[in-house]
Amino acid sequence: MRGLRAGSLSTRISGFQGRWSSPAIQQRGLKARKASKGTDEPAGQDSKQSFKGYFETVAEIMRMPLTTADPNIPSKRVTAEYCAKHYTAPPRNVTMLARDFISDSLYNPAYGYFSKQALIFSPQKGYDFARFRDSADFLRHMGQQYEDIERELDDVRSIPRQLWHTPTEILKPWYGYSVARHIARQYAADRKARIHSDPLVIYEVGGGNGTLMLNIMDYLRKHEPVIYSQTEYNLVEISPKLARQQLSRHTSSSMPHANTRIINRSILDWDTPESRACFVVAMEVIDNLAHDVVRYDFDTAEAYQAVVRVFADGEFEEFYEPISDPLISDYLAQRAQAAKEYRSPAVPPQLYRRIRAQLPLAPNMTKAEFIPTHAFRFVQVLGEFFPRHRIVLSDFYTLPDTVPNAVDAPVVQTRFDGSMVPCDTYLVQPGWFDIFFPTNFELLQQLYIATCRKPTVSAALGQVQVCTQREFALQNADLPQTATRSGENPMVDFYENNKFLLS
């Protein structure tokens, strides 16, 4: 999903990277900075970087804020689900796991970011790309639309809202058509190979404005009428506001699709078995799925889970305790089993840890690692309740401006005075900040295979693939429709920090 930082638009564009949201739309360059040290490289490979991390950790300790609240006042342990049912304002005198704090900040129906702050940029009509000289000309035009919409929002609301975009919206309908073409080809191949004889069943998770659903169904109706006549489309949406918007948009369409269904619930709470073969589509969803935070003991490399305490004055404290949460335990165990060669970049080699322990002010724990426990839960749901599914999942594998000195850290940002402002911590006022994460697709691929691909179905369904946005577009998109006059093509050139997981 959505935005990075505000800034002036670069005049020379050869690659665009989401996610962004700004009045002027800044081009981030060909390659974004790494999301954190160690995201792409194993820890311990560069001793200079390792010892630099020592000084960064000491500096982090020295700048930790103090709270005036009484730490002896008892606090109640809560979850995001409990907060959604019992709180209409951010709770005080409570403790919760890091993932519950993040999930509550984003999704609480009363004060969560997606309930009150976020709006999805959606032009009324798809762009005629042939009218633009090049990609820079297209971005200038879209940037002006952004400015106009944000100015209107600020004029009619005392509290500024945050506007963000998705590739589904700015490349519509062609982006949705490319996803539909991939699904139709795979479905036809499965029927031809007699893997199944079921109708086409699609489950989309997190549908935004509902644009992808309409584009996929429009494509099937126009280009694959036989498949379309048997298609069932289910859109699973956690946000009541977006679910109502999706339903309204679908019913107000000039040619609505009768074979669609909007389901207002969280996919993480899914408990209805789907025995038919189906496709699960999740486009820019897992970047906003909450993560837990762990640190490792420097001597033993034992993991500890982060807990967030909210004091009576609204200040936050993060502390660590031995792992007791079943989902964190399951994730770490599955990661160790499925990805035997993976070593957390947060844990330096043992020799380095022994040397560092001799330095003054040496911490007893490593830097933090954000682990994708809710994305892992999503994979568990697929394996348990959708045993015959194929997945079409796309999201970011790297992001700039992430929280510093942490592994796989998120971008945390809010809009202030017309600009997007990044933060250096996830401990921020719930509801006012977008929090989104990069995904290690190669690790996700291994976890997905171990969880969802049982031996009985693996041979029939074939390999699980990871590919880039460019590779997916070259295989499935109608590229002449999104080409500018110079030959530059946003469908291929934009979103170079996105990857796909396909099965």
Image (spheres, rainbow, N blue to C red):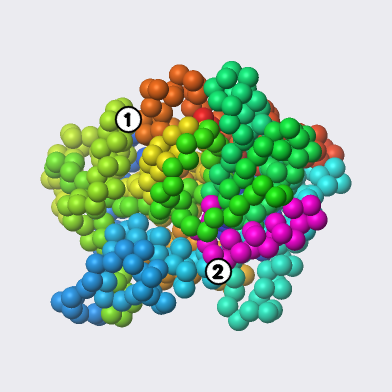
Q: Residue 349 placed where, x, y %?
A: 23, 34
Q: CA distance from mark 1 to mark 2?
A: 38 Å
Kind of residue at badge 2: Gln
Question: Which residue occupies 38% across, 27% down?
Answer: 454
Left or right placement of residue 255 versus residue 376 in this view? right
The mark nearer the N terminus, 1 or 2, is: 2
Q: Residue 219 placed where, x, y %?
A: 74, 40
The part of the chain drawn in magenta is 236-256
Left or right placement of residue 417 versus residue 438 in this view? right
Judge whether residue 206 is colored magenta.
no
Furthest residue toward right: 131
Res. 117 mark: 2
Instruction: For mark 1, give the secondary structure.
Output: helix
The reply to whether the C-beta atoms of the residues labelled 1 and 2 are less than 8 Å apart is no
Res. 109 mark: none
**Is residue 69 visible in the rendered structure shown here?**
yes
Quadrant in the rendering for residue 120: bottom right
Kind of residue at badge 1: Ala
Vertical side of 276 occupied by 21: above or below: below
Quadrant in the rendering for residue 474: top right
**Viewer-nearest residue: 83 or 218:** 218
Left or right placement of residue 297 versus residue 46 in this view? left
Instruction: For mark 2, give the secondary structure.
Output: loop
Question: Which residue occupies 75% across, 61% down?
Answer: 252
**Disc 1 packing (10 Å; few <14; some 14–19; many ≥20):** some
Marks counted in the figure total 2
Vertical side of 2 occupied by 111: above or below: below
Question: Which residue occupies 27% across, 71% down?
Answer: 94
Mark 1, residue position: 338
**Viewer-nearest residue: 127 or 352:** 127
Question: Which residue occupies 46% across, 63% down?
Answer: 107
**Is residue 36 visible in the rendered structure shown here?**
no
